[in-house]
Amino acid sequence: MSTASDSRARPIIAVLGGTGAEGGGLALRWAHAGYPVVIGSRNPDKAARVCSRINAQLGTTLVSHDGYQGAAGTAHIVVLTVPYSAQRGTVEEIRDRLAGKILVDTTVPLVPPKVARVQLPEGGSAVAAIQALLGDTVKVVSAFQNVPAHLLQDLGHEVECDVLVCGDDVQARETVIKLAADIGLRGLHAGPIANSAAAEALTSVLISINSRYKVQSAGIRITRMDTSEHG
Ligand SMILES: NC(=O)c1ccc[n+]([C@@H]2O[C@H](COP(=O)([O-])OP(=O)(O)OC[C@H]3O[C@@H](n4cnc5c(N)ncnc54)[C@H](OP(=O)(O)O)[C@@H]3O)[C@@H](O)[C@H]2O)c1
């Protein structure tokens, strides 16, 4: 069970779309690690249900909910977990709440029905486009594109995959690497925000692998890394 003292020094994380699969998994894991989490949702009833379920599961009160603007305004770090089709509109809705903050964007620009085919948007990366939209006052960090939601939701198992963390601000990447480490994931500095294109594309590769080999949760591991040496 998390205690108030665990969460005292921790930043508040807003998970916009935290009622969904990926956001719900991240919210659960961060609350389990002692972070105060605000689930941002368009639907208060749905959000209240998700919130109660996670708090009951963890025996905590760390998870609350609000609308997208309210959640983004309350939080120190904002995490975006909405579908690609809603990504830009959601960011435009909350942009005046983001100044000076880190926006962690998990978006994969899948284009149904061919989700196993890499179909990156014009310009290369869905997340880099958000950094371009927001300008320098917001530090956009791309992460978690290759982490399957159902693994995040299962606290009984370690997730066991690496997280490529891309962003133009090294300190912001470092913050997100710590957020990943606190939920048992190894985050790696993977370069500037433009490199997010590789992480976004990899998800379709993983979906192909899952389908071909009849597995559910192929993930990535970067080999020959000793992060204790490389910092
Ligand atoms: N699923 C995965 O394994 C996985 C892995 C890595 C990355 N991602 C990325 O995470 C994001 C969310 O994926 P997901 O699988 O978690 O999706 P999901 O289960 O459908 O949840 C997405 C959430 O986004 C919110 N939302 C906002 N605008 C929406 C709209 N126009 N239509 C539908 N939902 C909308 C909804 O919350 P409210 O209704 O409460 O507002 C919904 O619960 C995507 O960008 C995806 O690429 C997913």
Image: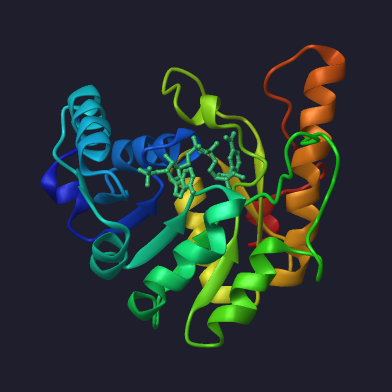
Image quarter where the C terminus lies is bottom right
Residue positioned most to the bottom: 136
* For residue 79, side relative to residue 57 (left or right): right
Q: Residue at x 54, y 32 (%)?
A: 149
Residue positioned most to the top: 214
Residue 228 drawn at (x, y percent): 63, 53
Q: Is residue 169 above or below residue 106?
A: below
Is residue 222 shown to the viewer in this render?
no
State the count of labels.
0
Along the viewing direction, whichever of 211 and 84 lies nearer the viewer = 84
Q: Is residue 11 above or below residue 148?
A: below
Residue 184 drawn at (x, y percent): 50, 38
Q: Residue at x 48, y 80 (%)?
A: 138
Residue 226 drawn at (x, y percent): 72, 49
Image quarter where the N terminus lies is top left
* For residue 34, side relative to residue 135 (left or right): left
Residue 193 drawn at (x, y percent): 69, 70
Along the viewing direction, whichever of 8 and 46 lies nearer the viewer = 46
Q: Residue at x 72, y 61 (%)?
A: 196
Q: Residue at x 60, y 45 (%)?
A: 186
* For residue 95, side relative to residue 13 (left or right): right
Along the viewing direction, whichever of 111 and 139 lies nearer the viewer = 111
Residue 110 occupies quadrant? top right
